[in-house]
Amino acid sequence: MKFSKHILACAVALSGSLSMAQSVFAQDGFLPGLLSAGGTLDDPDPDVVMTIGAGASYAPAYFGSDDYELSPSGTFRFDYVRFPNGFTFGSGNTVGFVEGFGLRGSANYIGKRDSSEHDEINGLDDVNRTLELGLGLGYEQANYRVFANARYGFFGHKSFVGDAGADLIARPIQGLTLTAGPRMNFGSNKFANTYFGINQTESAASGLAEYSADGGLMSAGVEITALYQFNPRWGVRADLTWDRLTNDAKDSPITQQGDDDQFRIKLVLVRRISIDF
């Protein structure tokens, strides 16, 4: 029942986002200025191929919350890179998957936790918005992939995080790619204490018990993705993710006020770009 409620709310909220995405899609080449001087967009012999996307997500208001909010979202990955010495990662000729070992760009955005907006955690320290940037490695073939990423969070939690996963991949019709597989999310001690810890001052202000959270495995779950490619450059991607908070993240008084089951639905317009420098 809870899951159905989240699906319905997201479908209504994202309907406007999909209309906007279709409008942007009609403006082919909407990323002028991305290239350095002399660069060529969608070059047939690229040095870099990457996939970027922008859209919206429906997700918990903060880690451990049972309140959900609609917010901006995006995606980013390297499909191929050729180094000056001729060494390459991935494939410059594929659409939708990287053949063999590939270098991955990894990015994630975490919205601000404003504790004053939530009665159950009022008195806890606010956490600024965080942009996580990093790299990862993956191995991918037509029907499966495995990957691992590491990132550092700027502006907000200022700590290291990582994730790992595997997917089965199906292409039932031309242009449509379906993936599904497990996910594991990791965080350092600083990350764990930022979002799940409660110091003495916070405890006095919020009425929640003091709590020190250790890092490690923060959550584990499953992600299902559908990508429809209109053409080799443009597509729409929908992600459905369920994570269950684990270990100290699950046992935190913050999570006990909310829910250790965390759902997220994301819809983004994606653009595949090949660049020759």
Image (cartoon, helix red, strand yellow):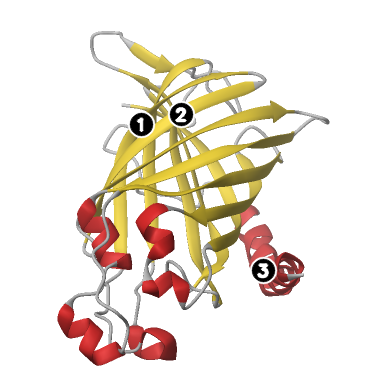
Q: Compare residues 19 and 225 and report the one nearer the observer.
A: 225
Determine whether the residue tagged by mark 2 lies in a helix, strand or loop: strand
Above or below, 248 against 82 in this view is below
User: Which amino acid lies under the numbered mark 1 shown in the image of this protein?
Assistant: Gly
Above or below, 11 against 38 in this view is below
- Which quadrant: the N terminus? bottom right
Q: Does 214 sit left or right of 234 as displayed? A: left
Q: Which tag, 3 or 2, sits closer to the chain's start?
A: 3
User: Which amino acid lies under the numbered mark 2 shown in the image of this protein?
Assistant: Phe
Residue drawn at 58 percent across, 26 percent down = 97
Check disc 1 and report the residue beneath it.
136
Crowd rating for badge 1 (residues with CA inside 10 Å; few <14, some 14–19, many 20+): some
Q: CA distance from mark 3 to mark 1?
A: 30 Å
Q: Is residue 195 visible?
A: yes
Q: Does 255 sit left or right of 180 as displayed? A: left
Check disc 2 and report the residue beneath it.
147
Q: Does 46 sit left or right of 56 as displayed? A: left
